Amino acid sequence: MTTTQPLLTARGLTKRYGRVTALDNADFDLYPGEILAVIGDNGAGKSSLIKAISGAVHPDEGEIRLNGEVINFRSPMEARDAGIETVYQNLALSPALSIADNMFLGREIRKPGFLGRWFRMLDRPAMEKRAREKLTELGLMTIQNIGQAVETLSGGQRQGVAVARAAAFGSKVVIMDEPTAALGVKESRRVLELILDVKRRGLPIVLISHNMPHVFEVADRIHIHRLGRRLCVVDPKLISMSDAVALMTGAKKPPEEALAA
Amino acid sequence: MAEAQEFEKVLSGSDTSVAAFEDHGASFVTRIQHFLHSTPAAVPLIVLLLAIVVFGLSIGGRFFSSYTLTLILQQIAVVGILGAAQTLVILTAGIDLSIGVVMVISAVVMGNFAVGYGWPTIIAVPVGLVVGALCGLLNGALVAYVKLPPFIVTLGTWNIIMATNFIYSANETIRDADVAAQAPLLHLFGTSIKVGNAVLTLGVIAMVVLVLILWYVLNHTAWGRHVYAVGDDPEAAKLSGIETKKVLMAVYALAGLIAAFAAWVAIGRNGSISPSWAVTDYNLQAITATVIGGISLFGGRGSILGTLFGAMIVGVVSMGLNMLGADPQWKVLLTGVLIIGAVAIDQWIRKVSV
């Protein structure tokens, strides 16, 4: 791990909302091909950190580098164009639109030639074909009709659509914010398998979760966030869940070697 | 496969289908609910056909004549076009209360430039269109960038534009004869085309063509899908990479432009141009057509074809009651019933998603 260069790094990120400091000089490192879990108490600044990386929030200070190059996202679209896909906790799906329309929201495919150029006509068949391929690849094709509105899907299926969207377009990093929070036992299992599936394709994943068993099961490294900054990074094989929780809540001080990671 | 935790071991023996639907249990009513959910223009279309049949049976052949039916279309052309503009705004979960007075001020500007200042009509019309679009742009900027609620913004601009209209025009009507003599092009959309007994005006044709164009844009272009997404869940739309502010600006500006186009059609229908049109409740008529047409006031749902049907329903009801010799207030009463009924049905259809 020490010999490879991190794919995505952040140094000294700071974000203030009025008097509230959400990010206080936070650092972040993601290595190629790994699953990095980010854990922290409520209000520790996990979401702000993720939003800064995914372009949804512009940090007041600090720099983010992707492949060593400084990046400066002004919108989620720019992060997506750079290959960073995010599955938000609220899924960011538009309930009344169809599955295919949702998967291509903001990057629709237009018909080739005259119809697309002059009438800006969407290429529905192409979008539906690709959406169906992606969902099948991820084993989610129990959805009968790709044209059905997302609001007619169950919670697990909606999660599946959001994950499929990220996996379909993410070329560098996939970020998942609480992907199992709203799901039942079986559907959580399915999403964890999806996460490992995405990893097997070589994409690194940032996983934000409060569910310690899930975190310890799939993560290669655990980034513990506390009071707006990175407290330490630990190896899930060398630490117990209760120690991780103790670090996260401030009940325990991090060991020296973990601080350096 | 991920290594399952202890309590999850039993999952290997469980049903492997992932949250599949059990369709066989769906009742007839549920199926209707699903059909209406996926075909939002169906309800107003059914109500429209019912209204035509009911009035047709009670009035007889006189109502069914192509003359009467096309006369209804002529009467609703202006409101139908304003309803189309209102639909765009309501789809984004907004509302435009200024749309009626935007139309009036655009008409007054067109008339004053063409007749009062003697500019060529070919220039006066675009000037009017620009005024309408600028009014819409002002609404859009206040909603998207200053982040004020659309109801408040357009309530304010409604008053501002109405007052400006009266101050600018000194409340002087431009007479039909003057328009016809100096700027006949302003009467363009009043031109009628007779096919047998049916009388269609260019205004009616413009309304239908406009709605069809907007239907295409809303359903078959990326921008149209973004309009729905912004109204459906603005936060999700933003995170999906849609520039929600630009979409809102464009929607309000387009609504203003369409209102100015409605002004041109209204001049054709009325002949004269009067600033006092501003006291007519065009806004409410446009909102009524939109709501009866099944466009959800919460945004993101409905088909613009429904608005066209909604405007036609109001036209059929008022013509039918008129021919029956009923007190005009019955039309108002029935419109109220239709509005409440339409919203109740909208709420019921929405429950399909639970």
Image: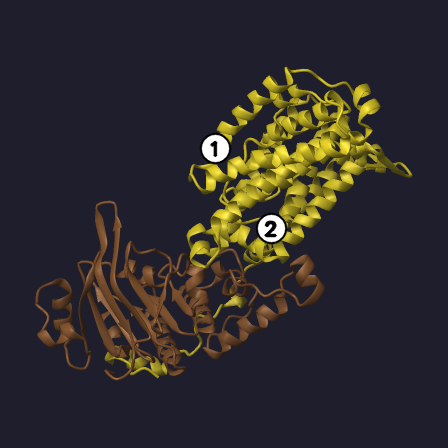
Identity of the residue drawn at 66% across and 27% down? B331
* Secondary structure state at the residue bearing disc 2: loop
Q: Residue at x 60, y 39 (%)?
A: B255
**What residue sits 42% from the left and 38% below the top?**
B146
Of badges 1 and 2, nearer the viewer stands 1
The residue at which mark 2 appears reads as: B40
* In the rendered image, the vertical position of residue B254 relative to residue B156, given as above or below: below
For the residues labelled 1 and 2, the Cα–Cα distance comes to: 29 Å
Q: Circle 1 sits in a helix, a strand or a loop, which is it?
A: helix
List the residue tagged with mark 1: B153
* Chain under numbered label 1: B
Position of residue B172 in the picture relative to residue B29 (left or right)? right
Q: Position of residue B296 (x, y in %)?
A: 53, 44
User: Residue furthest toward the right?
Assistant: B196
- Chain brown in the figure, letter: A
Residue A173 visible, this angle:
yes
B57 vs B289, nearest the viewer? B289
Image x and y of residue A42, in percent:
22, 58
- Which of the two labelled residues, at mark 1 and mark 2, occupies the earlier sequence position? 2
Colour-to-chain, yellow? B
Instruction: Please state the horizontal and vertical placement of residue A188, each as a whole percent of the image.
Output: 34, 72
Considering depth in this image, is A192 or B150 the residue closer to the camera?
B150
Closer to us: A239 or B273: B273
Q: Quadrant of the C terminus of chain A?
A: bottom left
